[in-house]
Every structure is written in C-alpha cells, then in structure tokens.
Amino acid sequence: MSHVFHRHLKHAYPTAVGGEGPYLIDAQGKRYLDACGGAAVSCLGHSDAEVIEAVRDQVGRLAYAHSSFFTTEPMEELADFLVERAPADLSSVYFVSGGSEAVEAALKLARQYFIERGEPQRKHLIARRQSYHGNTLGALATGGNAWRRQQFEPLLVEVSHVSPCYAYRDQAPGETPEAYGERLAAELEAEIQRLGPENVMAFVAEPVVGATLGAVPAVPGYFRRVREICDRHGILLVLDEVMCGMGRTGTLFAAEQEGVTADLVTIAKGLGAGYQPIGATLVSERIRAAIAEGSGFFQHGHTYIGHATACAAALAVQRIIEARGLLERVVSLGEELQLRLEARFGDHPHVGDIRGRGLFRGLELVAERETKTPFDPERKLHAAVKRAAMDEGLMCYPMGGTLDGRRGDHILLAPPFILDDAHLDEIVDKLDASLTRVLTHS
Ligand code: PLP
C-alpha cells in the first residue's frame, strides 16, 4: 500500500518516471501525450534542457535565501522581466509558491490597501459563481465552485457571487453578446449597490474561466464594463490568471485581449511550467505606493517567497518562450486545434460546445445537443473519459457537471506550446477513441 495521502484515496495512479517533450512516461515505459499540461502547467513540455540547466546552475550557486534577509538575482530579474511585459501600471511582483498563495496575497493586498487609505470599512469581495481561485480558505471562499466549497462552508468568509459570463448556456435566445454582457454588468452593479459601494473591496474574476467551466472566455466588452464599474466605485479589479495567464491564450496576460488592466493579477502554473513550483501577484503602482508610503510593510509572508531556484526556473522558462517565439505558435496551433476539434466533434451528438483561446480549449459534453441537457452528474462521465484517455495514452483535464444542471461535464485541453502538427492529430484521435469508448459503454 502506498503511504502517500492522495486526493483520490481509492485510485492507484501509474508511476511517472520520465518526460520527453510533450510526453510523460510511466514505469512500464508507456507514453502519455500531455494534452492538458497536468492542470495547464507544463507549457514547455517535460524535458527542456535549457530550463534543467538553469535550475541546476542556480541550485549549485544558491538554492534558497530567505526573503526577510536577502533579495536574489533571479528574483530581481524575474520581477523586471514580468513588469516590463505586464500591462501598464503593474509595477511590482510578490512571489509565492503557487496559485492559491497568489490569490491569498492578492486578497490581503486589497484589504491592506484600503486600510492604508483610511477606508477600513471596505471588506466585501464580489466574485463569480462557477469560478475557481484555489483551495486555501480565502481562495476557496472567493471561488464559486459549489462542489469544492460544500464541506468547508462554515470555515469560509462571506463573498458575494454573481453570474459568470458563460454565453453557451446563459446568453438568452435572440440576445446579442453585447446585451448579454450589459445584463451581467447590471447584475454586478446591483450587487455593489446592495452591499453599499463604499463597503466593497474588490471584484475577482478569471479572464478565461478554466477549471470550473472549461476554457470559457467572456463576451466582447464584458471586462471593459466591469473595469468601468469598479473604477466608478473605487473598487479594485483582481484578475486571476493562474490558469489562463503566461501565454496560455496567446498573449502573455489573458486580459490583454480584453483591453483592461487589473489592479492585481495572479499568475502561477505556466510561470514555472512545472519545473519548479512558483506563483506571483502583480501589483499596481497605486497599491504599491499606498503601502510603501503608508505602513511600509505588507503584513503577509511565506517561507518560500521568491525562492531563488523557482525564480531561476521561471526566468528560464519565460525567456525561452520569448526567444523561440512560442506565443505566436500558441495562437496558430490554438486556431488549428480548434479547427480540428470542430472537424471531428462539430457534429458529435454529445459535444455541445467547443471553445477557448490559444492553447486553452474546452469541450462541453451533453446528453442532448439541442436542449444542451447535461449528462446526469452522478454518472461521472468526466472521470470515465479521463480513465479512457489515460488508457489511450492521452492526458486531458476533465471536470464534472453540476447537480443543478447548470453545466455539463467538460474536457479541458491545455497542451504544451512546443507541439507540432502531428501532435494535434494525436490529441484529436485519442480523444475521439476515448469518447467513443466511454459513450458506447456507459
Ligand atoms: N486560480 C485559478 C484560476 C486556478 O485555475 C487555480 C488552480 O487550478 C488556482 C487559482 C489555484 O492554484 P494552485 O493549485 O496552484 O494553488
């Protein structure tokens, strides 16, 4: 019996022993095409020699120095790299070890900002239903994924949840995308009025919803309206790009495509591409200045903030993505992947929607296309698809439907940026074989 305490205690997983480009290899030598980057993490694949060398070199010189005593070269260089490329106004970076920690830091930065400004009554958060912001308690409270929250509700701070921007299911027949976006903006405005605008601290959202909805971008103009509303009421906009950021959608920051700049942006996953655990919160100048000129101290911290080896790995990853022109590749490969998914599954009776941006694509599985009726969530179709895909030698990231029928099962694809054309066919073929197996046998 394994002594590792896994999330899924009743399932045994294969032992991963190696990686080669976009493939993972298990102890039996079986190869799995990593079409989801684990959970949208491994954007450079699994064996990039330059990143491995950068990690080795950093560990050899200095693996770690506590951030209360020292800064380090890789941390400073990574911060410079990110700020130089981030949307204007994001002027500093707070490094942590993953996505949930990045969200926690963002929430505390928002709170402390208003305390420094003499507005301590601003403590309410507004986020969206069917969102995921992490599993630590603040991040879990912010997320609107009912299933993940369920058991832990008594431990969660109160957060208002408004509707997500989910056109496939929620845009009314005959309603234009613009009118739908307006309707959502009005809902946000109404919630702010209900709470009292002077009491609201921040609105938190994923620019492209990942884990909970399966690569769902907002309708055009939605985020610009959200930004306007936040500005009008002095509310901070926090964009969670932990999954959709760092080039996954074809631009370094997903919100660049929305034409908005947030006050706080969280990133993780693709930042270190899995070569090291690392996340970060990008901080706008007004928040940095309020704290720097006020108390001068952000009341937060973790042992591994700015871990030198993690920063060195992330710096190598990001420089490689830029030097090899991989973001352009994400755009072209992403369009090609969408076309091939549509060609294969466009008429599939159980694929209701194929969506996404860049190399961040989602398929929503439905019992019936016309009515968009989801499969019974108790059937756990997504889990069966994941198992069938692993048998086929394909990793895809599945998610279950909700008990209230608000969404169906999804498959999320977030492959490495280094794929070639043949890999796209392999993804589509293996996914097709997995779906056929599951849908004919269940
Ligand atoms: N935020 C978003 C948008 C995510 O997708 C995730 C993880 O999937 C998180 C936060 C939490 O990140 P982590 O699992 O690294 O704590």
Image (cartoon, rainbow, N blue to C red):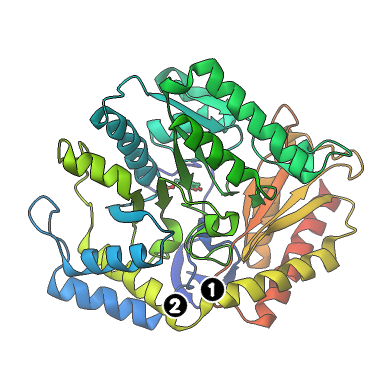
| Above or below, 162 relative to 167 | above
**Disc 2 marks which amino acid?**
Glu
Residue labelled with disc 2:
322
User: In this orientation, does residue 23 appear?
Assistant: yes
At x 14%, y 53%, the residue is 67
Where in the figure is residue 256, as x and y percent of width and height? 53, 59
* Disc 2 from disc 1: Cα separation: 7 Å
Q: Nearer the viewer, residue 165 or 35?
A: 165
Q: Is residue 383 left or right of residue 121?
A: right
Where in the figure is residue 71, as x and y percent of width and height? 14, 60
Residue 87, image quadrant: bottom left
Where in the figure is residue 323, as x and y percent of width and height? 43, 82
Asked whether the beta carbons under mark 2 and mark 1 sit within 8 Å of each other, the answer is: yes
At x 41%, y 58%, the residue is 88
Residue 141, image quadrant: top left
Residue 327, numbered label:
1
